[in-house]
Amino acid sequence: MTKIFLSHSSVDKEFARMLFSSFKGMNIDSFLDEVHIKVGDSIPEKIYEALDDSTHLIYIISRASISSKWVKEELSAAKMKDKSSKGFKILPLLIEKVDLPTNIAHVKYADFTMWRDPNLYRRSFLQVLRALDIEPILIKDSDLKWFARNSSTLRKCIYWITINTYELRGGVYADYMHKGAHYLTAKYAVREQGLEQDLKTIIDIIPETISVESRLFALRRASVEVIEYITSTLDICDANSVNSLVHKLVVLHDMLESLRSEYELILLAGVDIEEPALFEYSYTTKYALSDGKWAQAFQTLDLNSTAASIDSEKRNEKRGR
């Protein structure tokens, strides 16, 4: 079973989170320090346990990571494992235009230097999946039909999850000044602003019978995990548990945004269906796109009204969502 260790500098946390979310959306296990190392854990112990348990180390290369003591330690341990363990691999990912470290210069890297461009990110991520010998999850026609029906609801959920995540993060920071601020913010976000309801909505609109091979399955499972975490920690929450909730919501948000942008791009015929490097399609999906009927139907859903609807709601009482 593939298990990935993400070696990165804290400066590159945004990219590391995106990559972690992409793997989670593909039902691939990966280790990210802020998700898997809890308060009170021994950091070196957890890192070496994860390295020992991994089948691949992804080395995120940037100016910051090249000079990072932690990354150097992780890479050194990975190179020792590479020599002694069959099947273990180090996969370099270049996210800045820098000279490669000499100890990795002979290894072919995946170019993520334009990772903020969604299309180029997907191209590079597809290369990583192939390096891992993992077949990309096909975007099936049934998934596209589901998205066409539920895109407006999903957009609203994404918007409010984003707002609540920022407010929860603000509550954690405010707690340093006013003890208990995190607790009030968490209660407000979950109950008054409807975070819990948004998560339940995502779970409800994805059928329980969805195929395990579908990306929607991973999305539903991630939403269930966040709900279960809220249920188990809300009444006794402390600043650390709220901070953990923020991390879980960031991962879920990235999964939602990735799925939304890809599916919208396909349905609006914004991709060249003769160029499969961006996405892996099923044959039926290619046919549906070339027919053009789905794209036309999707455009008639008045998706542009979503932003106006959200602005209107912002002007209303948040309690009345």
Image: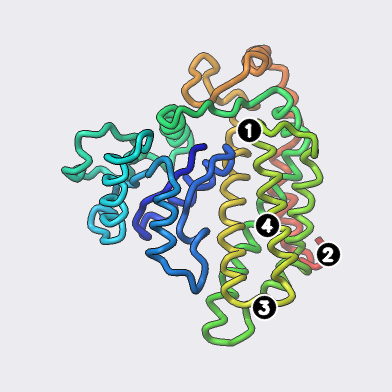
Q: Residue at x 61, y 38 (%)?
A: 259
**Residue extending furthest toward the front:** 84
The local crowd at label 1, few if under 14, some if 14 to 19, many if 20 or more residues have their Cα within 10 Å, is some
In x, y percent, where is residue 158? 66, 50
Q: Residue at x 60, y 23 (%)?
A: 269
Q: Which residue is mark 1?
A: 264
Task: Look at discs 4 and 1 and give the one toward the viewer.
Answer: 4
Task: Look at discs 2 and 3 and give the one toward the viewer.
Answer: 3
What amino acid is at disc 4? Val
Q: Residue at x 48, y 17 (%)?
A: 275
In x, y percent, where is residue 153? 76, 45
Task: Look at discs 3 and 1 and give the one toward the viewer.
Answer: 3
Q: Which residue is mark 4?
A: 226
Q: Which mark is residue 204?
A: none
Task: Look at discs 4 and 2 and give the one toward the viewer.
Answer: 4
What amino acid is at disc 1? Glu
Q: Which numbered disc, 4 or 1, marks the residue that appears first in the sequence?
A: 4
Q: Nearer the viewer, residue 109 or 75?
A: 75
Q: Which numbered disc, 4 or 3, marks the residue that appears first in the sequence?
A: 3
| Label 1 residue SS | helix
Q: Which numbered disc, 1 or 2, marks the residue that appears first in the sequence?
A: 1
What amino acid is at disc 3? Tyr
| Label 3 residue SS | helix
What amino acid is at disc 2? Gly
Above or below for 167 versus 107 = below
Q: Which residue is mark 2?
A: 320
Above or below for 73 versus 177 = above
In x, y percent, where is residue 280? 55, 23
Q: Which numbered disc, 3 or 1, marks the residue that appears first in the sequence?
A: 3
